[in-house]
Image (tube, rainbow, N blue to C red):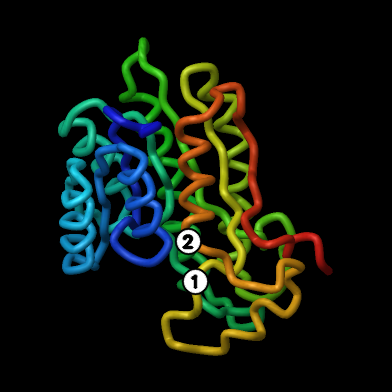
Amino acid sequence: MELEGKRVLVTGGAVRVGRALALGAAQAGADVVIHYGHSAGPAHEVKAEIERLGRRAYLLQADLSQPGQAEQLIAEAFKLGPLFALVNSAAIFEAVGWAETDRASWERHMQINLTAPFFLSQAFGRLLPQDAQGRIVNILDWRALRPGVDHLPYTISKTGLAAVTQALAQALAPRITVNGLALGSILPPSDGGDLETPILRVPAHRWARLEEVQQTLVFLLSGPDYITGEIIHIDGGRHLVP
């Protein structure tokens, strides 16, 4: 129970990877604050599952596309009690190439995937007591370190978040570590799309197992605090292949 007695906020913790991260933190002993935007039903389901594990779970709603709600979310989380860690998982992922990118899609991705995590992290750093230690983990994508022209607004927003990760690791040291997880093929498409094409160029020749993502998150939340500014790829080696 590496995280027993600690409280972790997971943004986007109601669905898909965020849900797995929230459950992984709970399985490691943490009490979890589950942020959701519009997925109230799934959020209540995750809360119940965490409580069945014997841990405390809390729900907080915030629309991270709206300015100011990131800071308000952190303030509400601290009102629940001491907060040890922030996991910036909430994101949108739209198949928009460079030619199709318009101002609305660009700004939507930047606000949710980049701006909100920055201001969440800034507020976390300001509200964490001066005598406390904390941790931030940003959920990235292998594309962030190998940007291309597909999913352009998404990719650029995650590239920016990789830079924020390394900048904040310096700005928030030594009290707060800031690291990133760059994910690859973790979950099949929610629309039931093609399962084979996404892993054709993955050296591991398979999809990830959710427990592998959970284990790496728990390592960054409970492991050495001498690790900061690091971005760990969980992509089966996909970032190595042109």
CB-based contact (under 8 Å), mark 1 and mark 2: yes
- First in sequence: mark 1 vs mark 2: 1
In the rendered image, the quadrant that contains the N terminus is: top left
Which label lies toward us, 1 or 2? 2
| Residue displayed at 31% across by 42% down | 9
Q: Name the residue that disc number 2 marks.
A: 210
Front residue of this view, candidates 42 and 162 = 42
Question: Amino acid type of disc 2?
Answer: Leu
| Residue displayed at 62% across by 55% down | 234
Quarter of the image where one finds residue 8: top left
Q: Residue furthest right?
A: 242
Image spot of residue 173 (x, y percent): 54, 20
Q: How many marks?
A: 2
In the rendered image, the quadrant that contains the C terminus is: bottom right
Classed neighbour count for the residue bearing mark 1: other residues with Cα under 10 Å, few (<14), some (14–19), many (≥20): few
Question: Amino acid type of disc 1?
Answer: Leu
| Residue displayed at 34% across by 59% down | 19
Q: What element does badge 2 sit on?
A: helix
The relative height of residue 189 versus residue 216 in the rendered view (above or below) is below
Image spot of residue 166 (x, y percent): 63, 36
Image spot of residue 125 (x, y percent): 40, 27
Q: Name the residue that disc number 1 marks.
A: 187
Quarter of the image where one finds residue 169: top right
Q: What element does badge 1 sit on?
A: loop
Image spot of residue 28 (x, y percent): 36, 40
Disc assigned to residue 227: none
